[in-house]
Amino acid sequence: MSSSVKSENLFQKKSCVVVCGASRGLGECISITFAKKFLTGSVFILLSRDGKALENVKTSLQSECPDQLCITKVFDQGIMQQENFECLFDGIVQSNNISLADLEQVVMVHCAGTLGDITKYCKEMTDPKKVRENFDINVVGTILLNSAFLKAFKDVGSKVIINISSLAGIQPFKSWSLYCSGKAARDMFFRTLALEDPDILVLNYAPGPCATDMQKDCREQSADPETKQMFIDALNSGGLLSPQTSIDKLCEVLTSKFESGAHIDFYDEIKQ
Amino acid sequence: MSSSVKSENLFQKKSCVVVCGASRGLGECISITFAKKFLTGSVFILLSRDGKALENVKTSLQSECPDQLCITKVFDQGIMQQENFECLFDGIVQSNNISLADLEQVVMVHCAGTLGDITKYCKEMTDPKKVRENFDINVVGTILLNSAFLKAFKDVGSKVIINISSLAGIQPFKSWSLYCSGKAARDMFFRTLALEDPDILVLNYAPGPCATDMQKDCREQSADPETKQMFIDALNSGGLLSPQTSIDKLCEVLTSKFESGAHIDFYDEIKQ
């Protein structure tokens, strides 16, 4: 199931790249970094709940990469209605006259997610609305968006799916039960996809501790003092990565030899 | 985090044992096997959506173990309303005059679950209702029931949580994406609980391929021919375990040395 052959030319293909959660943090960095690296004439579809922030990302992207087409769309994967997902891509493709036949590759980056309620321990998880919302946004919405993407672009030859995972997807952290279990579920879903469709290149990438707004929430909101201190220490010791450092490594991973569906961490050694 | 000391006397304590998903298959077998093994005078609370089947299990349990108290309650962990969970145990305790002060130990067995839609591949997961229902029943409901249990029995000294997991929680199977990712999420939730509360003994037990109704569904409904054949072969080669064989092993595991939160499979070697 090694996908080394396909991944070697990944950035050299005329692609349509979809980034969900593109308005800030890692999603923003991925959008702009990928726009620089992918063959010019590629299409970037940036999705986020935050339309204003998304327009700022588009402005940056277009100013740095004027030869890439950038399309933004306000989208919330936590809205559990079929039409929210099934009409999304067809609408974008039609209204922007994107020619699917001209595309060599489609790439989907699942970067949207919520930390969920990290102010509570497992035993305090008593609110059905909050617990469900976590799995709606982090898992159910990701699955539905992924299916919508694969359906809309089914005729494009080469497909790449990048799931922004986390160390929390393979290792528990105190007071992070919802986030950890949501990330574990996502990883397993994409491992299953990789097994089912060997033609799709799937990567679960754990980006390491990055200096993003989410990290700030970790430091400020984690109920568990030990978990909280770990994030405070990471900041104070200069142990946080810039999003760019992490996404540069993601680009290296994507052109390296890895088994489709693998969970690869920023700190893992890359096999060439 | 090894819990060998606590687990040695597990069956010798006067306990209240809650089994969710007790009306058939593994849950039924666990209920009756545990009723035979636990100190007489223990209390068994059996939960299931199927009230009629539950009464049959109660009749068997009481006929084999007349000195155990058996209480049944129709309960559906897929109903996402706070009162479904928060009133459950207090109601049972009060209406049956259970004296919490007399209990040395409480045990919760999470055995309820659904295979979800195994007739579809990852890329066909387009129905928000079905995808969400899978996570509601298998993950969100389990988390909420677990919190309700820990809250209701917070003053009882010794606590044991058994999550009926699956090989599918750590290994993907084609056309089983929802089941696999739900089981992965559950395992991770209970790993987090074990980390947060070292006083609770937590076990994720993968029971192996058992001759239950669920196995029949696997053979008949799995969309993927390879997965389907694997289950047909298991049946034809005599490779299926009886529920009793698997639950006897669970009992052995519970009195062995294991790290709280571990995922232990039927086929794993037991450490004494």
Image (tube, coloured by chain):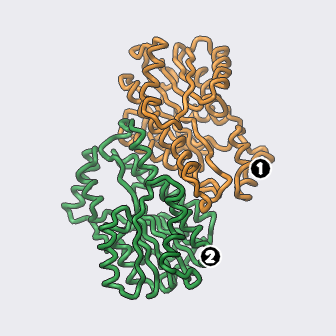
Chain colours: A orange, B green
Q: Amino acid at mark 1?
A: Ile
In this orientation, which residue lies closer to the viewer: B239 or B100? B100
Chain bearing mark 1 = A
**Viewed as shown, does residue B211 lie left or right of B145?**
left
Q: Is residue A245 visible?
A: yes
Q: CB atoms at circles 2 and 1 under 8 Å apart?
A: no
Q: Is residue B107 above or below residue B76?
A: below
Residue at left offset 45%, top offset 17%: A93
Residue B178, horizontal then vertical, whole percent: 40, 47
Residue B58, horizontal then vertical, whole percent: 34, 76
Residue A142, horizontal then vertical, whole percent: 49, 38
Residue mark closest to the camera, 2 vs 1: 2
Residue at left offset 41%, top offset 42%: B129
Chain bearing mark 2 = B
**Viewed as shown, does residue B65 lie left or right of B45?**
left
Q: Which mark is residue B155?
A: 2
In this orientation, which residue lies closer to the viewer: A137 or B230? A137
Whole-number angstrom distance, CA of label 2 to CA of label 1: 34 Å
What is the crowding at mark 1: few (fewer than 14 residues within 10 Å), some, or many (at least 20)?
Answer: some
Residue B212, horizontal then vertical, whole percent: 28, 64
Residue behind mark 1: A232
**Viewed as shown, does residue B152 lie left or right of A245?**
left
Q: Is residue A163 above or below residue A18?
A: below
Residue farthest to the front? B95
Q: Helix, strand, or loop for circle 1?
A: helix
Query: Can you say which quadrant of the picture contains the N terminus of chain B?
Result: bottom right
Asked which quadrant contains residue A113, the reply is top right
What is the crowding at mark 2: few (fewer than 14 residues within 10 Å), some, or many (at least 20)?
Answer: some
Report the number of discs.
2
Discs 2, 1: same chain: no
**Viewed as shown, does residue A121 lie left or right of A155?**
right
Asked which quadrant contains residue B264, the reply is bottom left
